[in-house]
Image (tube, rainbow, N blue to C red):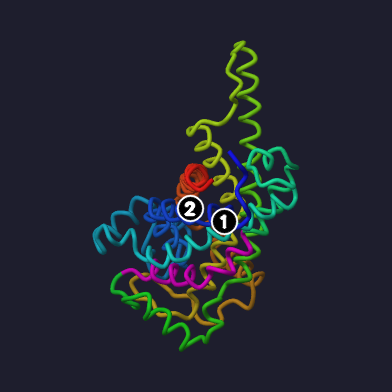
Amino acid sequence: MEEPGQLKQAVINATAGAVAGGISRTVTSPLDVIKIRFQVQLEPTSSWALLGRDISRPSKYTGMLQATKDIFREEGLAGFWRGNVPALLMVMPYTAIQFTVLHRLRTYASGSSKTEDHIKSSPYLSYVSGALAGCAATVGSYPFDLVRTILASQGEPKVYPTMRSAFSDIVRTRGFRGLYAGLSPTLVEIVPYAGLQFGTYDTFKRWTMTWNEYRSSSLNSINTDNGLSSFQLFLCGLAAGTCAKLVCHPLDVVKKRFQIEGLPRHPKYGARVEHRSYKNMYDALSRILQCEGWAGLYKGIVPSTIKAAPAGAVTFVAYEFASDWLESILT
């Protein structure tokens, strides 16, 4: 198969990335909604954390099962996909930009646009190019991420009935800069997160390809195709998503707090994050640690990790299949 031109390759990467991101986000939306509810709740998010603490009001959510039951009872099945439209508007251009920039950086560094040549390049390239691609994608799609967080966190009764009303109120009360509230911790988070996600994904792929070669030679197989199966790609994506999320979760909590500070919230969901509660990212980390303990920095870690693993797996597998299919019909 001939190597596609730069413009055609960019279209393939952007389209495959958008499709992969859209599928992944829709599939994992329920876990993302639960994660966000935990992250923006100032009170403890587990029943054991309530023991021995002087809490003036009970926590709205105290566990994944309890949160799932409450959301379903109060908001119905649609509650688990709250904010999914702005989430798709965020994640589809995000993954499109991310995979396009990633491919261009790898092509520039390796001198070839072929994926198999990218795998053979330096492992450090995967981490650096993944981090830079993540930064570019974040800046390009951030306002939709912010609105997604607000809509997913508000519960019932709704403060903002539509995405448009949320956008309008943010611009009116915070100005245009309000659409980028929390961007700094997001960029600080996305550098190690995207770097780890893409870097570990490529590392796991290399290890699996080596294992395939070893297995073929030990079995004296005449089959020289040591490519990865769909299941192996899924496992590599699963491992990459889990590793990245476990390391970077505290910064994601800080980002969510900045995104919703000062915005109205129904009292039954507990204390809200007041306007200018945190001076900067370091101050936010310190205050959360002081007021909520280490558990505060890892609020939502269970649904976040459960979500990150399949999200990473679905994204990478969908991207690999979509890009292969697009290449076959466009080249």
Q: Is residue 220 above or below residue 37?
A: above
> Which amino acid lies under the numbered mark 1 shown in the image of this protein?
His
Q: Position of residue 136 (x, y in %)?
A: 62, 64
Q: Is 126 on the left or on the right of 28, as rendered?
A: right
Q: Are marks 2 and 1 in contact (CB under 8 Å)?
A: yes
> Which amino acid lies under the numbered mark 2 shown in the image of this protein?
Ser
Callout 1: 10 Å neighbours few (<14), some, many (20+)? many
Indicate which disc residue 304 carries.
Answer: 2
Q: Is 132 on the left or on the right of 137, as rendered?
A: right
Residue beneath the point at 45% across and 49% down: 307
**Magenta region, main secondary structure:** helix
Secondary structure under the numbered disc 2 in the rendered image: helix
Residue beneath the point at 37% across and 71% down: 154
Give the mark nearest the N terminus, 2 or 1: 1
The part of the image, by quadrant, that contains residue 203 is top right
Q: Which residue is mark 1?
A: 249
- Give the magenta range: 134-155
